[in-house]
Image (cartoon, grey):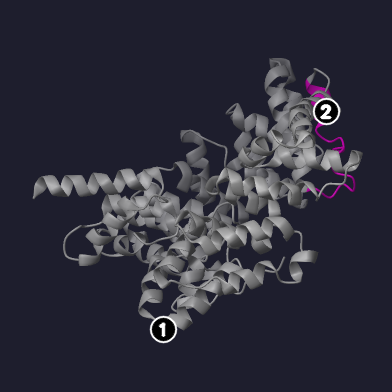
Amino acid sequence: MFEPVIAPSASLLGLLQRGRGDGQLHALAADRGEAIAALEECVTCDPRADWQLENRSLYYARLYMELEAPLTGLEQHLHAPEDVFDETEHRTGLALAVLGHLAAYGRRDALDLLRGYVAVGTNWAWALDELALRDDDRSLLRLAPAVLGRFPADQAGDAALRAVIAAAYEPRPWRLWAAHHPRIAVASEQSPFDLWQRQLNRSGITPGWSTTDVLAWADQADPSDDDGTDRGAVARRAAAAARCLAAVVRPQDRSTVLAAAAGGAPGARTAALRYLVDQQDPAAAALIEIAAADVDHRIVGAALEVLGRMRGPEALAHARRWADPSTGGTDSALGEAAVQLLADCGEPEDGPLVVAALRRWISVRGAVGAGLGTLIDGVGRLAAAGAVPALRHVYGEAVSSELRGRAAQALARTDVYFPRGLAVECLWDCEETTRELAARHVTTTGDVRVLERLRRLAADPAEEAEVHAAVRGRLTSRDRTQ
């Protein structure tokens, strides 16, 4: 899968790709043809880095409704030749989700597109889940032969059918079809048994019940990692070993654990470090510092990961020392991880360090990166007003709507102008948490768009319950004060 090309943040396409509230507002004010072209570009080439963290479908569906846009572009995308060869959900998932919302809004053409795609499309299961929430029983029953025809009437086909039924997000169509198609009824009954059997027959080597056994087990090859290159497999085994250590380590075993944490093999060393941190052992900080300077990148990564699990006054004292700019600590991986810890659980006095780290991150890496979210949350939690310019920059430039939402949360705590400024735009944002935040903080006087938007959100059946509650709370309280 190729990374999508994201347009500049000031352009109409860039705003829509980011899911910003200003994207909808600009699209409604722009030339209709240009707006529809930009909208289709977003829906047919998903701009999200992680569709499980970022929402776009309702945002785009609302804009389709506002623009009264035709669905020709989506139809061509769904039935393009690539659909035969590209079996990944990513290519068509966003378009199908948008069609699902449009069907809920009463667009018959969207409903027909979903039905047709279930019959012939590669990502038919997603389309079926969308129909399960919106279509009537009679129409769903007509789709059963086409779906059942995808599975040969042999042992492999029956197994595939059971797997699809078990993985279905919405079971309604399958329950409906089971009453009319014996093969589906049998597969539906067999699916829970298959799951139980897989859980019962889980294979794998378990550790012996001594500290030495557990540390040795932490470095054994994972059966799921055939070529030994899966770093995640090593980390998962080390985490499991650390939990086992909590159950088996005796006071006389501490020297064994300390030795493993100081110079053991990667798996055992990671498990020992994590165990010592979880037990708040006084030796943990020094051992993490040593591991962070190791030549093995696996050991360095493990040390920085377990550092984030440290808690308590002593942990904060070590983190402040590691992050001290006067020692050059902020330029090291250990210093960066220490600032992340201060952002996560530091005290108000740590605000300047976290703000400086946020500015440095943006100047070096831009408004991207997993660690940026922790820094944003940190300055918000610490109410560090000095971070406002940096937060506004992240809000405007971040491609990730999830990251922008975190910036909005931090601005609500640090920026006195947020209720009259960005909160207004956030009412149109693609993320429901950001819309809820805006509804709770926005000033309802001075901008005629605000009350109208609040009323429309309150009346929209597709809106999330949390947003409805926040909006109606604001509207009710305003009515009472008049």
First along the sequence among labels 2 and 1 = 1
Which amino acid, by three-letter code, is at mark 2? Arg
Inspect the magenta stretch and tell me whether residue 437 lies in it: no
Residue 161 picture location, percent across and down: 79, 41
Q: Find residue 46 and report its horizontal and vertical position in percent.
A: 60, 66
Q: What stretch is highlighted in magenta?
A: 211-230
Q: Which mark is residue 31?
A: 1
Query: Which numbered mark, 2 or 1, is in the foreground of this view?
Result: 1
x, y percentage for residue 24?
A: 40, 69
Q: Is mark 2 on a helix, strand or loop?
A: loop
Residue lying at 67% horizontally and 42% vertically, measured from the top left: 168
**Tags 2 and 1 touching, CB below 8 Å:** no
Q: Give residue 30's quadrant in the image.
A: bottom left
Q: Examine the rendering and report whether any part of residue 444 can be seen.
A: yes
What residue is disc 2 on? 202
Q: Is residue 119 left or right of residue 412?
A: right
Give the CA separation, mark 2 to mark 1.
59 Å
Q: Is residue 289 visible?
A: no
Q: Which of 37 and 152 lies nearest the eye of the viewer?
A: 152
Counting other residues with Cα less than 10 Å from the Cα at mark 2, is it few (<14), some (14-19), or many (20 or more)?
few
Residue at the left extreme, as displayed: 482
Q: From the viewer's perspective, tell me whether residue 81 is left or right of residue 476.
A: right
Secondary structure predominantly adopted by residues drawn in magenta: loop
Q: Where is residue 372 in the image (x, y as percent from the top left)?
A: 51, 57
Q: Nearer the viewer, residue 123 or 205?
A: 123
- Quadrant occupied by the N terminus: bottom right
Q: Give the residue drawn at x 47%, y 70%.
A: 16
Element type at mark 1: loop
Q: In this view, does 116 lie above or below 301?
A: below
In this picture, residue 225 sits left or right of residue 375: right
Residue sitting at x 90%, y 48%: 227
